[in-house]
């Protein structure tokens, strides 16, 4: 650290993104990207905008808001496009949290929540998952604190029902409840319609997973107009042109091609079911996933050892060195061919006596 670092941030432990190695071609199943490319119309739309990169983009993202509103069944005023859904989460911690207004979230969830809490000087109220890794909605009733819940949760992949979420939102009317729906298109049910009833609900979504746009960075906040106005106050105080020209065009084209992306989601859900069955046949415990990844543990090999053995064989998965989940690996669902490679390597590792790996 230099001697210039602000004392406010000197103790910050930043988020560690999943590895994006360039040393060799891995079977990459570690950051929950889609294995399927963007549709041709998306690539063409981004290319068209490339020739206009000398001009600033539309800070209001008007066209994209109009299309996203139709997609989500809300009004354009209910939408705030962002530079990946990480950005809307940061805006939410900034807008609604402070020293006296904590954010509550599960002990096992998206690793960015505690980082944003730290960054924004917002106390974190950490609530343990049940022993079976599910969220107990009862833990969030009447907290009178801001809340952020990933639904489906990450890295477990397990989802809450809309009625459980509604009970949490209803029982904390004076604070904001953020529902992070990064993985909602792979089997959960979205609670976007609830924004019409509850003025304290912010739903976040991303085009990084189901819409094959992780590299373009596009997410959305969806909420009542007054919450969106507050979040815009933060946006226009930080980075008014937060969604670049090519990404705005790519996002709009992706919405036009929704059927292509929904078909890809269906394929991923099929591949997930086949992969879960194959892992269970090999002796793994696999949590019930509504996402584009599986969280799995094997009695004969620790999560860290399995991660390292797979990496040595050219397959990348994600391991979290954290109490309660260090026995697990998180495996992104790729193409059927990629999953065959993964399963082949796992079989070989287990045959070699994986625990020594
Ligand atoms: N929420 C969850 C639960 C995630 O796993 C991720 C992906 N790392 C995000 C939000 C952020 O995704 P993005 O910024 O790419 O939209």
Image: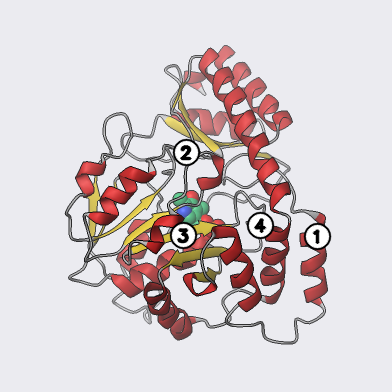
Whether 152 is drawn above or below 238: the answer is: above
Residue closer to the observer: 36 or 27: 36
Q: CA distance from mark 3 to mark 2?
A: 25 Å
Q: Which mark is residue 41?
A: 1
> For residue 319, which numbered disc appears in the image?
2
Dot 3 or dot 4: first in sequence order is 3
Q: Nearer the viewer, mark 4 or mark 1?
A: 1
At a point 79% along the width and 67% down the height, the residue shown is: 45
- Which color mode does the image show? secondary structure
Q: Nearer the viewer, mark 3 or mark 2?
A: 3
Query: What is the crowding at mark 2: few (fewer than 14 residues within 10 Å), some, or many (at least 20)?
Result: many
- Percent across and percent down for residue 338 are 70, 32
Q: Quadrant of the N terminus?
A: bottom left
Q: Locate residue 269 relative to residue 191 in the image: left or right.
A: right
Closer to the N terminus: mark 1 or mark 3? 1
- The CA distance from mark 4 to mark 1 is 13 Å
Residue 219: percent from left, percent from top: 55, 63
Residue 9 in sight in this render:
no
- Residue, disc 3: 204
């Amino acid at each position: 650290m230099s001697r210039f670092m602000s004392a406010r941030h000197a103790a910050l432990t930043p988020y560690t993104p999943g590895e994006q190695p360039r040393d060799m071609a891995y079977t990459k199943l570690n950051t929950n990207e889609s294995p399927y490319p963007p549709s041709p119309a998306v690539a063409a739309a981004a290319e068209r905008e490339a020739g206009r990169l000398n001009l600033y983009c539309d800070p209001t993202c008007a066209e994209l808001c109009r299309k996203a509103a139709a997609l989500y069944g809300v009004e354009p005023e209910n939408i705030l496009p962002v530079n990946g859904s990480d950005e809307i989460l940061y805006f939410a911690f900034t807008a609604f949290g402070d020293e006296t207004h904590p954010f509550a979230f599960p002990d096992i969830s998206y690793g960015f929540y505690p980082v944003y809490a730290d960054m924004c000087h917002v106390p974190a109220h950490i609530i343990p998952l049940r022993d079976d890794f599910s969220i107990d909605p009862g833990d969030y009733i009447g907290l009178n604190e801001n809340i952020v819940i990933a639904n489906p949760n990450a890295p477990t992949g397990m989802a809450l029902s809309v009625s459980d979420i509604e009970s949490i939102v209803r029982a904390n009317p004076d604070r904001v409840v953020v529902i992070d729906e990064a993985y909602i298109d792979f089997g959960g049910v979205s609670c976007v319609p609830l924004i019409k009833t509850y003025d304290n609900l912010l739903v976040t979504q991303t085009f990084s997973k189901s819409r094959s746009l992780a590299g373009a960075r596009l997410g959305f906040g969806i909420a009542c107009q007054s919450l969106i106005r507050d979040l815009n106050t933060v946006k226009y105080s930080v980075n008014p042109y937060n969604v670049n020209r090519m990404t705005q065009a790519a996002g709009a084209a992706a919405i036009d091609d929704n059927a292509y992306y929904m078909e890809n989601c269906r394929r991923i859900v099929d591949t997930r079911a086949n992969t879960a069955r194959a892992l269970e046949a090999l002796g793994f415990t696999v949590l019930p996933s509504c996402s584009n990844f599986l969280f799995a543990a094997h009695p004969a090999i620790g999560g860290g050892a399995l991660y390292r053995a797979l990496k040595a064989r050219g397959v990348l998965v994600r391991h979290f060195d954290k109490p309660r989940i260090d026995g697990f690996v998180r495996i992104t669902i790729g193409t059927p061919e990629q999953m065959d490679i993964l399963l082949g390597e796992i079989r070989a590792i287990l045959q070699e006596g994986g625990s020594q790996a």
